[in-house]
Amino acid sequence: MDALALEATGSKKATAVAVTAPIPSQAPAKRKPAKKAKKAVVFFEVEILDAKTKDKLCFLDKVEPNATIGEIKSMFHKSHPQWYPARQSIRLDPKGKSLKDEDVLQQLPVGTTATFYFRDLGAQISWVTVFLTEYTGPLVIYLLFYFRVPFIYTPKYDFTTSKHWVVHLACMCHSFHYVKRLLETLFVHRFSHGTMPLRNIFKNCTYYWGFAAWMAYYINHPLYTPPIYGEQQIRLALIVFLFCQIGNFSIHIALRNLRPPGSKTRKIPYPTKNPFTWIFLLVSCPNYTYELGSWLGFTLMTQCLPVAFFTLVGFIQMTVWAKGKHRSYLKEFRDYPPLRSPILPFVL
Amino acid sequence: MDDPAAPPPHHHHQLSAPCPFPSLPPGAMASSEEDGTVEEKENNNKKRTKSALVTAWLTFYNIAMTAGWLVLAITMMRFYIQKGTHKGLYRSIARTLKFFQTFALVEVGHCAVGIVRTSVIVTGVQVCSRIFMVWFITSSIRQIQNEGSVILFLVVWTMTELTRYSYYTFKLLHHLPFFIKWARYNFFIILYPLGVVGELFTIYAALPFVRRSGMYSMRLPNKYNVSFDYYYCLIIVMLSYIPLFPQLYLHMLRQRRRVLHGEVIVEKDD
């Protein structure tokens, strides 16, 4: 699953690249000049009510008119330490949309006494933590099966290696794929969201780890049957796999370069000098396209039904994400290239 | 997984305007309105005709299913009265049961299209579990067809479906006798656990035959590099009743409290 999936999952502010600047720490720098200004400043009063019970949770007086929601969240956190800013959802209406951290108080449709509604988003966990955990699992688990650690297969096969060279190749490809993902999480991706709900880590890890174990069991099984068309099939599969891995990486780099760190402009991704990005002419989310291609290559290489199944499920999920992303692109940009499809050129 | 009193009661509240069949001719109110609203009226008429068709289809569907389960009920009773034993009863109703239980897949379509306001997944799981029992347990494993547990769940299913479909039928016809409503929200208290017992015992009885015959199973080595053991699959299915049954049962108890006693339950935002 590609890292940029996070853009499409439940995020209304889906952007390709962003840096979460720690807003509260910038506030003092902004505040000082304001205090020194000779003009009279109209302070706001902010009251925060619980969205469900309408109880008054917090009352803040003397709030700067140019204070952001992020700063208000920090202030709220001080009076209610169990609700750190990441798990606060502040909205104008109990059933409305969540306000963004960057929204400025005086630009909101509120009077000088602003009433906000608070909803607890539940325990949160950072995206980076989730990604690192969910990708390290398959890497380790696959290797456990590859080295035929005891209690998996019959004891006489413990710590033996497969006699088929495609099994070794598959292990290298699988491991390479997840190492690439881990490195991208650490060095390439720019996450626009800091956190996600805690329960997601259990859901995601079950998915990745479960499938990894299921696939690895059969590929590294002593009774594994290599591909029917032998070397030709494996060679073709490897070419497809490597091509798509490079393509996927190119797209990630292109998306990262779309926005320099710190700015919040959203731009349409376009093909660059790198030929692997030329697919942007036809597809909105080519990272998913290449991801699908990689797994198709791996399926062909291993000729293993569980791998095909994993590819299919991943494809369905990525299509959902791609369609959402495509729709938000169309909504945001009037001049969005009409030739592009969400994930498969001309088809889907 | 059995679910005697399945989807929530607000099935049909969404469906019809107070009067599902248009009673006023389209132009009746034109005199006091501007021209611009003619299109709106045409759209409203289209919506009303659509809603009328939908209601007509749903009514037909629910009447047909009530009739089908009634036929099953009567056939089963006649068999038992004539033969005095339940041996061979399943065989005699197998085809009818397969037909009507499989046809219930249509209900998943209703949810997907939106004419019935229930979750697709919930309905899907319920219908699939029934189809699984019918096609993959009782119909395919002959040796267990004369078990008492089979009769148990058949009786439970029949009573449940009769109450459920007649409830929907009457609701659609706006003529719901209190007894049917009472039955739909009370029978399940006994029927649901009984149904689960019947199903679990049936699957348990089937296990040795599955093991011996190796049916629906695939072993290594094979060119797909996959294996499947139906025996262990059934064991997992049986175990899955443990988390799922209490959840569904409690859900239905909550529904019951809401519908029959009008208890105000604080709305939970999801």
Image (cartoon, coloured by chain):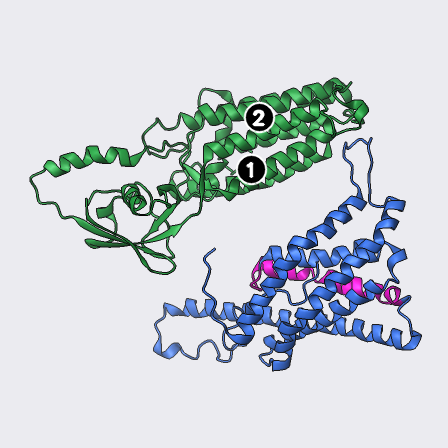
Q: Chain of mark 1?
A: A
Earlier in the chain: of badge 1 and badge 2, it is 2
Picture coordinates of residue A14, whole percent (x, y)? 42, 39
Main SS class of the magenta portion in the image? helix
Query: Which kind of residue does numbered mark 1 sit on?
Result: Phe
The shade of chain B is blue
Circle number at residue A346: 1
**Left or right of B42 in this view: A82:** left
Question: Which chain is represented by green in the image?
Answer: A
Q: Quadrant of residue A257?
A: top left
Callout 2 amino acid? Tyr
Q: Residue at x 65, y 67 (%)?
A: B5
Q: Quadrant of residue B127?
A: bottom right
Q: Which disc, if any, is residue A178?
A: 2
Cβ atoms at labels 1 and 2 below 8 Å apart: no
Give the class, few, some or many, for how many residues have Cα within 10 Å of label 2's Cα (few <14, many ≥20): some
Q: Is residue A65 visible?
A: yes
Most extreme residue toward the right is B83
- The image shows residue B1, relative to residue B41, as above or below, that is above
